[in-house]
Image (tube, rainbow, N blue to C red):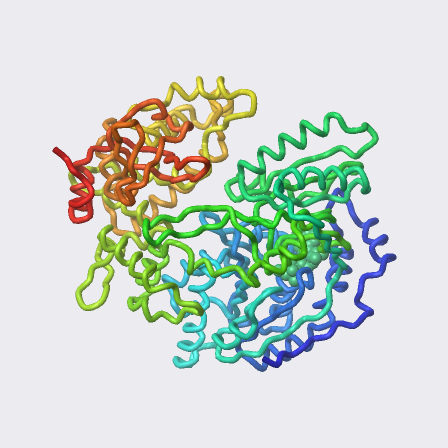
């Protein structure tokens, strides 16, 4: 594929002098307008602006590939706005992750010197920071997908930039098909055109170009800052040990304020690494910079995530321990060193069991490049790859599209609600395996969301379920709670909201016993779901009092978030035509029945040896020690999560009656349950 190269003149390479001058504009980590303008002008994309606009004028769809930090995400939407190309509507730029959408919108609003949420805003699940003035909108791909539910032509947008296209999340993949179709339909109807821009630093351009009607590929050449890449000489069997050695080596050899970003696989690993670094740093020589350590993972509350992005105080060094949420798009101030363990926890789907599991696996080359890219955002940097060059050469070129490795039921329900009923023939860039689609259709069918006559159709229930931006199982719980003989919708939406936020209980290191004792007030023999509700109800009774939360080891912010989500779910109930929401139950059996109606696929049965059997798969599982049912042995439970560590655990449990499973899905359980 012949691409168009947009060259960058050497004059745009940053001069050391310029950097010095910039530092003088640095007040409390905030750059002045002049300094921001100077950074923008130094970006490789800046000198390519006119050529880029010319190309965009010629073709309704373009693919832009340019190195990390060349300025794609922050600058191209601004170019569109300034050149008048985005006149007929809003400019949307999608991001695979919310933290990226938020921090980039902050940056661009600062560059344009406007208030965040006005001309420049962001929209992520459960948080819309835009208003009627908004012209540039950074949003998660999931949010744009939801908008397409109400308006398949995406009429309010003049341009849609699908960023970090190489990540190939399910939402991005579905969006590819939807924006392509919206562009075509708008043209056929004689409506204002839709401009599509696909962006990334690392992608299979031929594959993309072919899918988007042979659209031109624009190569942005040039990198703002040089990045040194170092490999280990030998394979590392203990990558966590190797990470620690590398961190302390950098810490002893480099200047303060030269910060370190480490890529790890998940929350537990990150939290334990935080503690180890803190413990070890006590015995370091006192002349070394002060160490500030920030975890950064998806389930961390937003304000804590954003702390990692702040500038490091004078004389200190920041270490950010992150999952792959920091891999693409983001600029974390001060990062000069990246440590890449070469591993990621990613979703994979077992079609035989119908379950999504998270498992640690090797990253792809594209991911390794993105990680390296985080080192050269504001200055030259170095990446320490904790694997050998040979191991690198054996990695997959690209990450396998998520759509080829996850549970499709929620995606398919949304597609059907948009009117794409023939999912098997949807124009996917890489269609998922036939069995996965069939499996998802099956799941939706047993949930009662779709029915099969000639082809699949959404049922009335399915329509209502598609209104909620939730896993179909959770939407089903809400709808099951509305039945005349159940009437527990208030409780059901509280529960679903509580299941949609991060843990509301805080177990500080060294205070395990106290936290456990505090929890006893709320525990219930009916399981963790009811315990969560007990906590929420007490929280409301004490009007969110901070002292009460502190004494009870409760994370106020997460409970407030649940309250916020709950309000939105209540509004969505109205939208789904659910009239009678008010209930006020003290008996929780009806709620547990509703949980069984939605989550019956996650039922487990007690065995003679005290373990449990997951009924959908026959797999042996055990109750996780964090559950309030840990030492109890209820005959049947529903679990919210399956975790593989040394054993296979079930977590967040609800005690149920086996008859309820029969009521919920008689066909499904006929063969699985033997009730005397
Ligand atoms: P790309 O999308 O090509 O990777 P971006 O447009 O995201 O590049 O960023 C280009 C450059 O703008 C970064 O290398 C950095 O210098 C600057 N920048 C972007 N976002 C921020 C931010 N939040 N804080 C500081 N600098 C930023
Ligand atoms: Mg980017």
Q: Position of residue 416 (x, y in %)?
A: 31, 62
Q: Is residue 460 left or right of residue 522?
A: left
Which residue sits at x=29%, y=27%? 609
Which residue sits at x=70%, y=68%? 45
Q: Is residue 273 above or below residue 374?
A: above
Q: Is residue 389 left or right of residue 406?
A: right
Q: Position of residue 519 (x, y in %)?
A: 42, 22
Q: Position of residue 661 (x, y in %)?
A: 20, 40
Q: Position of residue 613 (x, y in %)?
A: 29, 37
Q: Quadrant of ligand 1?
A: bottom right
Quarter of the figure with the N terminus: bottom right
Does residue 478 appear in this view? Answer: no
**Location of residue 624 by image quarter:** top left
Which residue sits at x=22%, y=58%? 459
Q: Is residue 310 above or below residue 606?
A: below
**Location of residue 227 by image quarter:** bottom right
């Amino acid at each position: 594929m012949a691409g168009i190269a947009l060259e960058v003149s050497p004059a745009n390479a940053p001069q050391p002098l310029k950097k010095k001058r910039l530092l003088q504009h640095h007040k409390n980590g905030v750059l002045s307008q002049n300094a921001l303008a100077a950074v923008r002008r130094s970006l490789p994309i800046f000198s390519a602006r006119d050529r880029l606009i010319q190309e965009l004028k010629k073709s309704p769809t373009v693919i832009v590939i340019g190195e990390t930090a060349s300025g794609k995400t922050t600058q191209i939407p601004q170019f569109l706005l300034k050149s008048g190309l985005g006149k007929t509507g809003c400019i949307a730029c999608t991001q695979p992750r919310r933290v990226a959408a938020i921090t980039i919108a902050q940056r661009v609003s600062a560059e344009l010197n406007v208030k965040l949420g006005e001309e420049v805003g962001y929209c992520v699940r459960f948080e819309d920071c835009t208003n009627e003035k908004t012209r540039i909108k950074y949003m998660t791909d999931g949010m744009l997908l939801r908008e397409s539910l109400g308006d398949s032509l995406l009429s309010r947008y003049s341009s849609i930039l699908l960023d970090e296209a190489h990540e190939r999340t399910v939402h991005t993949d579905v969006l590819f098909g939807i924006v392509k179709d919206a562009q075509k339909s708008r043209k056929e109807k004689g409506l204002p055109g839709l401009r599509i821009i696909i962006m990334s630093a690392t992608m299979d351009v031929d594959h993309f170009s072919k899918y988007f009607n042979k659209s031109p590929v624009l190569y942005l050449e040039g990198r703002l800052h040089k990045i040194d890449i170092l490999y280990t000489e030998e394979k590392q069997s203990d990558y966590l040990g190797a990470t620690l050695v590398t961190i302390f080596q950098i810490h002893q050899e480099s200047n303060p304020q030269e910060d370190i970003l480490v890529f790890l696989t998940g929350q537990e690993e990150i939290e334990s690494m935080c503690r180890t670094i803190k413990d070890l740093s006590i015995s370091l020589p006192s002349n070394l910079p002060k160490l500030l350590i920030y975890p950064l993972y998806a389930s961390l509350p937003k304000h804590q995530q954003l702390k990692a992005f702040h500038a490091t105080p004078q004389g200190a060094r920041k270490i950010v321990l992150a999952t792959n949420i920091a891999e693409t798009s983001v600029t974390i101030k001060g990062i000069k060193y990246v440590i890449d363990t070469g591993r990621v926890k990613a979703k994979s789907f077992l079609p035989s069991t119908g379950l999504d599991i998270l498992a640690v696996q090797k990253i792809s080359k594209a991911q390794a490049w993105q990680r390296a890219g985080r080192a050269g955002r504001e200055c030259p940097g170095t990446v320490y790859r904790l694997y050998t060059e040979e191991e690198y050469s054996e990695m997959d070129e690209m990450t396998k599209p998520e759509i080829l490795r996850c549970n499709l039921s929620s995606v398919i329900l949304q597609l059907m609600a948009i009117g794409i009923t023939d999912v098997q023939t949807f124009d996917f860039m890489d269609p998922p395996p036939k069995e996965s689609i069939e499996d998802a259709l099956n799941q939706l069918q047993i949930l009662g969301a779709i029915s099969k006559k000639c082809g699949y159709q959404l049922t009335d229930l399915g329509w209502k379920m598609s209104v909620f931006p939730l896993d179909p199982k959770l939407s089903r719980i809400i709808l099951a709670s509305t039945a005349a003989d159940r009437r527990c919708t208030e409780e059901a939406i509280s529960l679903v909201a509580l299941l949609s936020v991060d843990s509301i209980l805080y177990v500080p290191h060294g205070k395990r016993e106290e936290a456990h004792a505090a929890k006893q007030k709320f525990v219930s023999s009916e399981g963790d779901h009811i315990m969560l509700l007990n906590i929420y109800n007490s929280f409301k009774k004490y009007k969110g009092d901070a002292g009460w939360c502190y004494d009870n080891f409760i994370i106020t912010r997460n409970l407030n978030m649940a309250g916020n989500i709950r309000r939105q779910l209540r509004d969505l109930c109205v939208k789904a035509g659910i009239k009678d929401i008010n209930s006020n139950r003290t008996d929780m059996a009806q709620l547990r029945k509703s949980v069984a109606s939605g989550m019956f696929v996650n039922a487990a049965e007690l065995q003679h040896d005290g373990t449990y059997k997951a009924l959908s798969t026959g797999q042996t599982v055990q109750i996780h020690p964090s559950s309030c049912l840990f030492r109890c042995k209820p005959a049947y439970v529903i679990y919210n999560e399956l975790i593989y560590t040394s054993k296979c655990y079930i977590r967040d449990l609800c005690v149920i009656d086996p008859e309820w499973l029969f009521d919920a899905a008689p066909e499904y359980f006929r063969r699985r349950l033997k009730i005397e």
